[in-house]
Image (cartoon, rainbow, N blue to C red):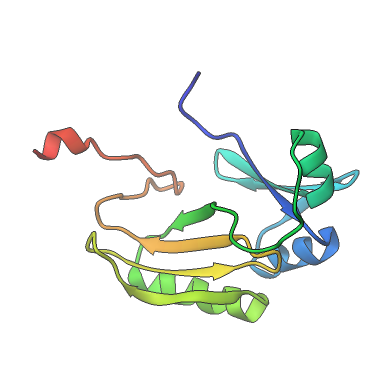
Amino acid sequence: MEQRISLITLGVADLSRARAFYERLGWRGQQVEETVFFQAGGSALVLWGRDQLAADAGVDDPGADGFGGITLAQNVRSRAEVDELLATAASAGAAVTQAARETFYGGYAGCFADPDGHVWEIAWNPGFPLDPDGALTVPDFDANG
């Protein structure tokens, strides 16, 4: 199995509301039937009805919104960009769940939750530089000792 993620699918309570939220963040989606696809670098973020996603995955869903043990992260190029994106998310309707702060790894990060409770971390990490296209390459930790 290749070490990559192609799609991240979020089960949402209201597809129109979720799409509008992400579009207020500046993302552009394409709706196909009852699913919205957003190109996200070399992968895609997909919004789909929570009940449909659970049925498709063959799991029971207790229907509780909120933290489901998953966070999504977007690394950015500067501390200032962390603050800007958290403010943009808040103005789009997100709940800031963790104000931007210094991190244990020498970076700067904060978190927000979208209208369905999916948590996003926005982080600047000097140890994870980004390519010009925004791609992240995990550093060789063994090379550092």
Tell which of 16 and 113 is nearer to you: 113
Looking at the picture, how far across and down is residue 127, in whole percent? 24, 52
Tell which of 131 and 40 is nearer to you: 40
Seen at 59% across and 68% down, the residue is: 113
- Quarter of the image for residue 28 reads bottom right
Name the outermost residue toward the right.
33
Q: Is residue 6 above or below residue 73?
A: above
Q: Quadrant of the C terminus?
A: top left
Tell which of 3 and 44 is nearer to you: 3
Looking at the picture, how far across and down is residue 3, in whole percent? 45, 27
Looking at the picture, how far across and down is residue 29, in whole percent? 75, 53
In-image side of 118 versus 46 (left or right): left
- Quarter of the image for residue 21 reads bottom right
Looking at the picture, how far across and down is residue 103, in whole percent? 28, 66
Q: Is residue 46 above or below residue 83?
A: above
In-image side of 33 versus 11 (left or right): right
In-image side of 91 versus 83 (left or right): right
How many callouts does the rendering have?
Answer: 0
